Image (cartoon, rainbow, N blue to C red):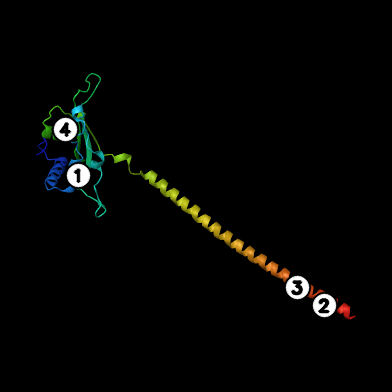
Amino acid sequence: MYFSNNQTTQCEQDFKILLQAALKHDTWALKVFDAWGKPLPSSLLKGNLYWVGNYDECLQSMYLPNNKTFLSQPFDTQHCTIAPKTSALIPTPTLSLILGICVPSSCNRQAVVSLIHTLFKKSNITEDNVVCSNDPPNGQKSLTHGAIATIVILSILGLLVLIGTVIDLILMSRDDNMLSHMNGYTHFINTETSEQASIKSSRYSLQTLMK
């Protein structure tokens, strides 16, 4: 058992799978542990104890550029931050570690506390010191049903407007062609009428001269 509880929980089962996969050097498990806060960040001698880890790496699936797919893992993960609880009466200690870890989403705060007690032998950590989150990185939340319905309706309206515009253009083009044909026919009739009038005038002139 990796936790203080005697009863096996889903969190314990998932964490056991994670440890076994890491020992086998499975990429997805190494990615989860790689998202943990590291003990040797920069400026350690200057008091940098913010080992928050990598939130995005913890929650996002690992992309494999070779086959252009995302690496699957048997369970979702969440990022938890362990920090000392501060208040107006109890200020933050000068040297206080803030640690970020990546654990299965099935683990609640009490399970995370038990994990910290087991791994780091820290018995003074409580649930008040733990903050966990599995919100999508960079605020990328999935769309609500209302937003999806609005997008669909607007898309349909836009499609109808586009279809109406195309139909109007086709009708206008037909009207222009018909008008052009009518103008050509009228011009032809007028030309023919003028020629006939000219012929009649010539005949009349000849008849007049012959008299």
Residue wearing tag 1: 31
* Other-residue count near label 4 (Cα within 10 Å), few / some / many at <14 / 14–19 / ≥20: many
Q: Earlier in the sequence, mark 1 or mark 4?
A: 1
Alpha carbon of mark 4 to alpha carbon of mark 2: how far?
Answer: 120 Å
Q: Position of residue 158 (x, y in %)?
A: 47, 51
Nearer the camera: disc 1 or disc 4: 1
* Other-residue count near label 2 (Cα within 10 Å), few / some / many at <14 / 14–19 / ≥20: few
Badge 3 element: helix
Alpha carbon of mark 2 to alpha carbon of mark 1: how far?
Answer: 105 Å
* Other-residue count near label 1 (Cα within 10 Å), few / some / many at <14 / 14–19 / ≥20: some
Q: Earlier in the sequence, mark 1 or mark 3?
A: 1
Alpha carbon of mark 1 to alpha carbon of mark 4: how far?
Answer: 22 Å
Residue wearing tag 2: 203
- Which amino acid type is marked by label 4? Val
Alpha carbon of mark 3 to alpha carbon of mark 2: how far?
Answer: 12 Å
Q: Earlier in the sequence, mark 4 or mark 2?
A: 4
- Which amino acid type is marked by label 3? Glu
Residue 82 is left or right of residue 176, and the answer is left
- Which amino acid type is marked by label 1? Lys
Q: Earlier in the sequence, mark 3 or mark 2?
A: 3
Nearer the camera: disc 3 or disc 4: 3
Alpha carbon of mark 1 to alpha carbon of mark 3: how far?
Answer: 93 Å
